């Protein structure tokens, strides 16, 4: 088992990573929650696959109850949250009751938001079950839900007291979702750590075969990079924007495709290749850097070409949240693998190379 | 104009108090908000009474829009919040958009909660228009809404960037509500400051006649006491419980009366007299202390007798949120005017003197 510490002063917390790490949940409940009262929030798939096993593990430290929500991003909304509040009333959850968010990014985001707002904040433990949630959304304290008019419009910053990552959960993650998680893993290498990127190049076979040691290594390395960035910039003012590498075009692709056919990690994969191209075209890095990124993502099986909507369509979507024409976007480019930089560019400059 | 500083490290903020202080709103918007974009949240009564005048004051620094919600505690719920989110979408409120909460406690609580959760937190300015909101709910950062199953079940701690208090608003506050505000003012004197209590005894005539200098003094003094307590105990672990003086019985009275006939300040007034009685009966303070409290509240015109529900009914309500029979409540008593103490008492001990 590996432990990583996220340093945020009084809001610091540890992350535990291991194969079979879920067995340490009872100990963690005692250590990190202020009382023996807690609830488990999860989704239907995880409840079906893992509830019996987890019930056995929690035999002597039973929760007040399980709150099971439907699967899928479209349920990450205020209505689901209202339903959870109702259950918390029924279960008599008080200020000293903890919440365990057991599931992927949706459960983590909703669980964190409920924990942030129930009785003005209760402690919560993240137990992320998908690779994407393990390397990304379980760390950083961003919680939130979508409104019909946009994603993550409502939310709060609320740090968990503990993050518990068990690589065994990855055995039941659908392949396509697993690859999407790898897209973010590759991102961490590109923006901050060339030797990690090299590790990925060399060990991609093992990783794709779910070798647990390799998984523990890449999750740990990814989280260290993210934790390091979040520790220095909790509320997202500067440094944290490096995490948006590949996301400007990625978000545009998601919006243009209506969020349906193309998954987030796939859109980001395409966006990362494009960011490398922009960096090359603007003289920041040699072509070899573009090639390495392109090749690794292809080997993983992630898409590397941007869908051919018109430049105009891309530009329109990227400019949607800008106040004035010509206003610059904090686009993230690279000077080399491991060396990301903020490039203030106009929408026109960003879309030029499409 | 008077200024008080609430010290909470990076979340510190000033409070400005004065007659006609609303004229300094444009300057404050520039100073305390990160951009010139902001919205005003208010209720129907305040909009009707003050919108024309405030529009004139804001002629050159117009808001993106006014969001007007219905009056009354029963609208302090997730449905009203959802409506406000929708308006924020329409008004294109982004992360750098500020919110001005202009109104009484309900507007302040909802406005603070919306500011805490819109895009994971935007800055907000409190402009409380009732005495109760001015001396109590505008300071402390507690925000929240009610669910049908209970009050303030959903919320967040989110500090305003500025609190602007104009005593002119008090001219249109209904008399009964004004007296309820005074109930909390008296509380501050009782729990922390005998000389302030003496000031109230001597100047109650002026205060009841809305003498602005007297009002500015009592608001300032009350806020200093509250700010001092909140500064030392932002998240309500210890000291802050002194603010609950009179509230244990007060809440029970509100619950038993169904929140309708008896207003919060009136219930607290009765609760404070009872707390003095409990303190006297338990040998903490002489009878003279009870008399002074009783007399001042009567002079103000606040009720001082507890409604005669059975002891059993009171006990049942007070014990409702306790886990185990016999568990102690952190009841607040006094050793004298200005000297409050936490008394861990059982429900039986608390209700003995009813």
Image (tube, coloured by chain):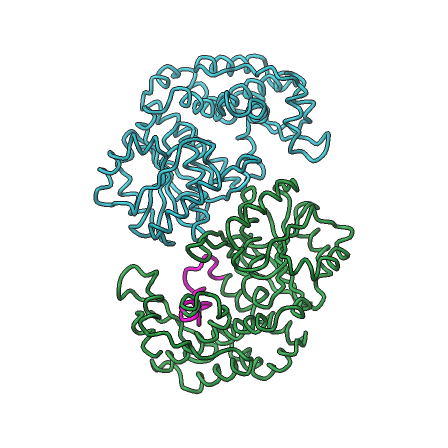
Chain colours: A green, B cyan
Image location of residue A245, percent across then percent down: 44, 71
Q: Is residue B209 left or right of residue A42?
A: left
Determine the residue located farthest toward the bottom in the rendered image: A288
Region in magenta: A232-252
- The quarter of the picture where the N terminus of chain A appears is bottom right
Q: Is residue B93 left or right of residue A36?
A: left
Which secondary structure is most common in the magenta stretch? helix
Image location of residue B177, percent across then percent down: 42, 23
Between A201 and B207, the one lying in front of the other is: A201
In the rendered view, tell whether residue B91 sits above or below residue B316.
Answer: below
In the rendered view, tell whether residue A220 sits above or below residue B72.
Answer: below
Q: Quadrant of residue A213?
A: bottom right
Residue A305 seen in the figure: yes
In the rendered view, tell whether residue A220 sits above or below residue B291.
Answer: below
Residue B340 seen in the figure: no
- The quarter of the picture where the C terminus of chain A appears is bottom left
Image location of residue A58, percent across then percent down: 75, 54
Residue A352 falls within the magenta-colored stretch:
no
């Amino acid at each position: 088992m590996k432990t990583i510490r996220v340093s945020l002063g009084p809001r610091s917390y540890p992350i535990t990573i291991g194969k079979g790490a879920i067995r340490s949940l009872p100990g963690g409940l005692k250590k990190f929650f202020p009382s023996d009262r807690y609830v488990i929030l999860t989704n239907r798939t995880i409840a079906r696959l893992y509830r019996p096993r987890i019930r056995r593990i929690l035999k002597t430290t039973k929760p007040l109850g399980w709150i099971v929500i439907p699967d899928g991003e479209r349920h990450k909304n205020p209505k689901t949250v209202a339903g959870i509040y109702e259950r918390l009333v029924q279960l008599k959850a008080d200020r000293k009751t903890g919440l365990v968010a057991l599931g992927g990014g949706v459960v983590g985001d909703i669980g964190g938001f409920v924990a942030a707002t129930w009785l003005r904040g209760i402690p919560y433990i993240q137990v992320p079950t998908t690779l994407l949630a393990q390397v990304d959304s379980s760390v950083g304290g961003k919680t939130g839900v979508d409104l019909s008019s946009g994603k993550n419009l409502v939310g709060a910053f609320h740090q968990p007291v503990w993050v518990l990552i068990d690589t065994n959960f990855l055995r039941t993650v659908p392949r396509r979702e697993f690859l999407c998680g790898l897209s973010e893993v590759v991102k961490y290498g590109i923006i901050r750590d060339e030797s990690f990127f090299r590790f990925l190049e060399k060990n991609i076979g093992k990783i794709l075969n779910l070798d647990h040691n390799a998984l523990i290594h890449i999750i740990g390395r990814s989280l260290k990079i993210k934790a390091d960035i979040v520790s220095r910039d909790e509320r997202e003012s500067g440094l944290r924007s490096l995490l948006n590498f590949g996301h400007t075009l990625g978000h545009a692709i998601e919006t243009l495709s209506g969020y349906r056919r193309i998954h987030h990690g796939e859109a980001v994969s395409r966006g990362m290749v494009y960011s490398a191209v922009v960096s090359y075209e603007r003289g920041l890095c040699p072509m070899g850097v573009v090639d390495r990124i392109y090749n690794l993502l292809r080997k993983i099986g992630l898409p590397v070409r941007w869908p051919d909507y018109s430049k105009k369509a891309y530009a329109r979507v990227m400019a949607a949240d800008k106040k004035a024409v010509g206003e610059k976007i904090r686009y993230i480019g690279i000077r080399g693998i491991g060396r990301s930089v903020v490039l203030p560019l106009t929408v026109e400059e960003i879309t030029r190379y499409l």
